Amino acid sequence: MKEININVKIMHNVEVWLKRANEDDFKLVKEAHNTSQPYLLGMLRDCTYKDVVDKGMGFNGLFDANTGGGYEDKDGILIDIGAGNCSMITTAHATDPSGNYYKRWTGVYTASSAESTNGNLYLGTYDLGSGDGFSNLWATANIGSWSMNTGDILKVHWKISLAGANPYLLTQLRNALTGDSEDWFLGDNGLFTSNEVHGNEFKDGLLIKDANFYYPMITTVHSSDPSGNYYRRWQGVFTGPLNFSGLVSLGTDLVDEDVGFDTNEWDNDSLSAWSMAAGDILRINWKVSFS
């Protein structure tokens, strides 16, 4: 048995720009990095095996005012001001260029009096609106303490980027950050139920290849992952004979024996070639994890 892991890395970059009331332009004053909170890791994991709706940033509307204690049921960026928190006016960055697997949001806070922040920022959805933060906390960052005078403006650009998988999977996960994640998960079309291409067209799972053609592996979902483990796993089984070339792939919407998943391939790997005799069994566990 062989175990393969796709590890999707989720990276955050927070740029901090400050414009004093007596200055004309913003100045870059800080850059911070952080790790994701459990909710975001779990949400992206869930996207790989089921439809996920009503979860994207902005689905409920983004913060459109600096409101002490936050803005109930809205999404965006919160900042600690004084003894509480406050919503930052949050806007989405323009559509990302093709091939850039990230989404970015801008938060703006304008000081209405002499104020200070401990530098804690929060990104999330479904704000509770009571000063208690988000129901769905995506990430946190600390940008250091700042004192602000009346009219000073603090602006942050918060980017979430994804890496570590094929373009198709990264594109779908990136899009899930801002919209519904439907009709693309592994198993949405049904999983492979035999080692024959006929009858498995347009289905999902693991493929194995000889010198010329792809063949489905009987694919099943791993039992429910324990809470706190941010991955999903599928198992493929193929019974010989086959002159296995070593190439295996994971994906959705099998096209045919010639091109496999074509553009819907999630990942591929090269194992050792193996001349499988009749009755030989190859079993592969393929895990998609998030960190």
Image: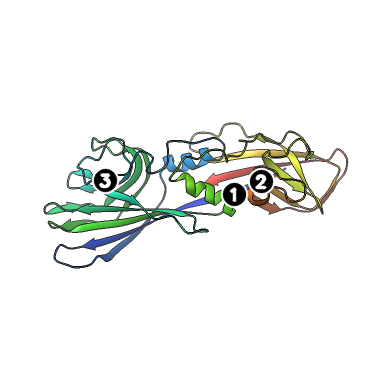
Left or right: 99, with 104 as reference point: right
Type of amino acid under label 1:
Ile
Q: Image point 16% across, 57% down: which residue?
A: 148
Mark 2 touches mark 1? (CB < 8 Å)? yes
Mark 2 touches mark 3? (CB < 8 Å)? no
Residue 250 image label = 2
Any part of residue 98 in sight: yes
Q: Position of residue 59 (x, y in %)?
A: 39, 40
Say which label, 1 or 3, has the lower sequence index. Answer: 1
Label 3: which secondary element = loop
Say which label, 2 or 3, has the lower sequence index. Answer: 3
Tell me the CA gap for discs 1 and 3: 38 Å
Label 1: which secondary element = strand
- For the image, the number of numbered tags is 3
In this picture, is 224 found above or below 82? Answer: above
The N terminus sits in image quarter: top right
Q: Image point 26% across, 49% down: which residue?
A: 89
Crowd around label 1: few <14 · some 14–19 · many ≥20 (10 Å): some
Crowd around label 2: few <14 · some 14–19 · many ≥20 (10 Å): many
Q: Image point 42% across, 36% down: which residue?
A: 54
Residue 64 image label = 3
